[in-house]
Amino acid sequence: MRDFEYEAPITLAAAIELAGKHNSSARMLAGGTDLIDQVRVGRLAPDMLIDVKKIAELNVLEHSSFGLRLGAAVPCYQVYGHCGIVSDYAALADSCRIIGGVQIQSRASVGGNLCNSGPAADSIPSLIALEAVALIAGPKGRREVAVEDFCTGPGKNVLAAGELLVELKFPARVANSGSHYRRFIPRNEMDIAVVGVGASVVLNDAKDKFVSARISLGAVAPTPLFAKAAGDGLAGQPVNDDSIAKAAAAAKVIAKPITDMRGTAEFRMHITGVLVERALKAAVARAKGEHVDCKVGH
Amino acid sequence: MATANKYKVIGTRPVRHDGVDKVTGRARYGADTKIQGMLYSAMLRSPHAHAKIKRLDTSKAEKLPGVRAVVTAKDLPDPGTRIAQLGEGAVCMAHLTRNVLAREKVLYKGHAIAAVAADNIHIAEEAVKLIEIEYEPLPVLLDVREAMKPSAIVLNDDVRCEEVGAGTTGSTPTNVAKHFHFEKGNVADGFAKAKVVVEREFVTGTVHQGYIEPHAATATWNPDGRVTIWCCTQGSFTVRQQCSELLGVPLGHIKVVPTEIGGGFGGKISVYLEPVAAALSKKSGKPVKLVMDRAAVLEATGPTPASYMKVKIGVDGDGKITAGTAYMAFDAGAFPGSPIGMAAMCAFACYDVPNGSVDGYDVCVNKPRTNAYRAPGATNGAFAVESVIDEICEKLKLDPLEFRAKNAAKEGTRRVDGPVFPRIGMWETVDYLKKSEHYSTPLPKPKFGGKVGRGVASGFWFNCGLKSAAFATVNTDGSVSLSLGTTDIGGSRASIAMQLAETLGLTATDINPNVVDTDAVGYNDVTGGSRVTFATGIAAYEAGEDIKRQMVQRAAVLWDVDPSQVSYDVATASLIGPGKNITFKALAEQVNHCGGPVIGRGFSSEANQGGSFGTHCVDVEVDPDTGKTQILRYTISQDVGTAVHPSYVEGQLQGGVVQGIGWALNEEYWYDDKGVMRNASYLDYRIPTIYDVPMIDTILVEVPDPEHPFGVRGVGEVPIVPPPAAVANAIANAVGVRMEKLPMSPPNLLKEILAGK
């Protein structure tokens, strides 16, 4: 491991200034659960680590009638420990509960998971399904990017040199809605998604028709995918197995999985369909106010 | 069949002597060694699976400030064609030294080439990047059947095929290092008598022992030519022998100090780092520490072979086996030495097979050189044989345990490879399992909405005796310090101390067992072959008998009587003379004044340990939409001989099963076409977690081994043998798909399920 400098600014402005000074040789450190490992194995060799955990704006966790604001450095355990998130943004809590073990969850942040931009990241499909928007700050000011447009390749994203993720903004939950994230892993814990699927649905008052739906896929392409057409196709459809199977078939169309040590392309394609169906059914159940028992590994 | 009441200490469950150190984190493992002035080191490993080394220049690395030494194969003496006897058989030194540091070629990704010692690990790692090396890549052989083709590129020019049994050796270079052929009866006649004959082909992947502790070695080479090595090894004496040969240092100039060991399972017998750390120390003049990272452990140590097998079994109308044949080709990795011989001997060992033949091949491929892994080779063979048997039982509508009871090998049964069994417990393991609550209970309902199934399978492992020696000294408070030379991997300090306590009539806590260095105890073979509680137990028993004789003499001095008038009473741990008696503890206080210190010694040499059998039952649930298998319930019935410490026996059985489940469901080296292992981490090389296995129920069948004073039988290895077959049979029962490939991972199983639809 090569030597590096460490700074822990307490203001956003100071962080941006530092980042600008070191340009692309600086890396932001939130929980560090990805970054430290990457530095240790030599995949990254930054000159400067900027610890963003002491910046107030990045620790915001605010749930109101306007929606949810989640600071980029808020660790996972705070997410699934927050009653409002568990009830209104259930998919996000699902993700945070299965990222690593307790020790990792105590450090790792959703913002860090997004900025690491791994194709198999467990939180990103939930962020997409829940319509999250990334608030980015940099030397040229602030901008907002929809999460589905954030990642550009494995480990790559829209952040320019000197920019950092400040927070994730979510719209308020609407009535008769529910969401869910699930992944397929060969083991039951401590594993990485072979396929991950996020889904959120809005039902009509009678709860027998879809008003709208958002479906997202992880680990089946260089970036997490937003299966927009598959979700849009559900609008106005009856809530039944047939509609859900059609949505799953439509979602599979955009998947471009590869064959690797975690599964063959054919396997991933098949699992994508299976998981979209299961995720939609769980989201529907939540929209109906039913309890969804997320069994280990399933 | 419980033997517990027969003994005072044996069969009880005292807290292990090394327990406090281990649960408080005070126990010192391989990487915990720290010595004043110690250097840290890093290795250059090959990025190629097969290549010639055209040029190797370490000069830039040597010039980096903080670098104290760089070594390559040139720093190890060339052993030529020497074959060395290293305790457990002949070792080709040309291959061993080339595995430690590559010479002309690299033969697998991760093959060690050079090492740098520096003031800290970061400098050492930077220096490794400065080593200039030029490769000429060669075609990569990963598949055992490809490597056996006459047209295949040959990995090692010096390898000729040895026809074991015939005693002949081929004349041309080949990847096929050995061919075993065993035969019994008349195979053609046997199959002619069969009502049902099933023949199937099986493929298994490369798997690793999966010990949690990475290899680590620290060495000092003193100016007087004396070398001390601290390492986590299964055999300090074999490390001493290997290093003596590899470094050209007299055996007596090397002291090996074994640290605690965080798992070995057969993978920590051969040396990797020890001679390199010593060579770096010689060159730098300082102590040097060398530790592997996880990727190096997976890419360059272990593993156990991938295999291709074809098994054919015939059964008559009465459900009796009439004939069986097996063809088994195992990949040895880069150098010869897969456990194919043992695999071939174990293949049909559970059964009375009147007519049989087994052909086994040891084949070099561009993977790390394979090493022993818990019942080496037997698990592969059992997967094939037990799967075929299950299919036959299904065809003949026979209960699989009835079938096993009917065909079980017994005392007097001759194995296909020749030997006749002594008293063994195969039939008993089946009988106990048949009567178990698990087997008598109908399959549970699905827990996750999938399909449930049940499978059974049996397995055999030889167990071995080899050589052990122990010293025991009586302290003045009546405690006894016991010096052992066999690494404690599975609770053997406790199990051996208990045998000494039983011998002397003391308690387990009266004994202080210590694993000591190679200068402090007599010669011991490795901790392996499920032999330590058996053989070192005999050594401790003999040391106890020796102590008894000496205590009798001391009492005779104390009482001024003839020793023949004194006897040792084990029941009360006291010495009884004419009208007198004295307890062991009271006499211990006085021995130094009435004859001198009492030092017992004992050894065991090649005691003939009987084999061990196990029969397993597993319930699984398969998700037919994803191919994922959950283990719902698992029971193991095993002949464990006398269970010295039942908790540790149960632990061995459970541990073996868990490793077998990992092998069955997910573990596999995943190679790309360039021979690069793409899953060299515990994220993607999936050993089971606690969420993946239920509590493993154990049935301890105690058939005492007549070769041991307390009837001890090795228990550690055979529990890994049946699980892949048992799980495969359960999957077949659940979803009607017979898996002929390991692992039965979700992608592999789903493919078969979908093909079956």
Image (spheres, rainbow, N blue to C red):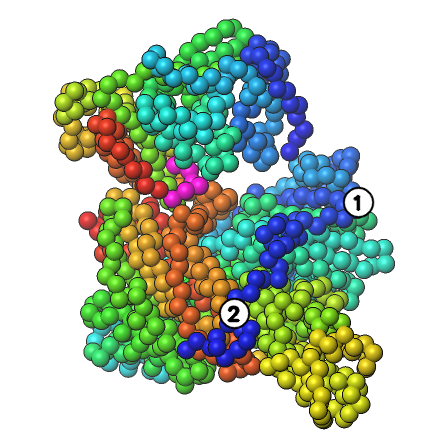
Q: Would you name the residue on which mark 2 appears?
A: B12
Q: CA distance from mark 2 to mark 1?
A: 46 Å
- Label 2 or label 1, whichever lies nearer to me, is 2
- Against B523, residue A102 (above or below) is above
The answer to which of B296 and B46 lies nearer the viewer is B296
Amino acid at dot 2? Thr
Q: Chain of mark 1?
A: B
Residue at far front of view: B579
The numbered mark at residue B469 is: none
Q: Secondary structure at mark 2?
A: loop
Residue B282 image point, x, y percent = 79, 52
Residue A84 image point, x, y percent = 36, 22
For image coordinates 50% across by 83% down, the residue present is B706
Residue B671 visible in image: no
Q: Secondary structure at mark 1?
A: loop
Amino acid at dot 1? Gly
Judge left or right: residue B429 versus residue B534: left
Mark 1 Cα-neighbour bin, 10 Å: few <14, some 14–19, many ≥20: few
- Against B336, residue B351 (above or below) is below
Range shown magenta: A188-193
Residue B536 occupies which quadrant of the picture? bottom right
Which of the marked residues, 2 or 1, is nearer the chain's N terminus? 2
Is residue B403 within the magenta segment? no
The numbered mark at residue B37 is: 1
For image coordinates 37% across by 29% down, the residue present is A93
- Against B453, residue B193 (above or below) is below
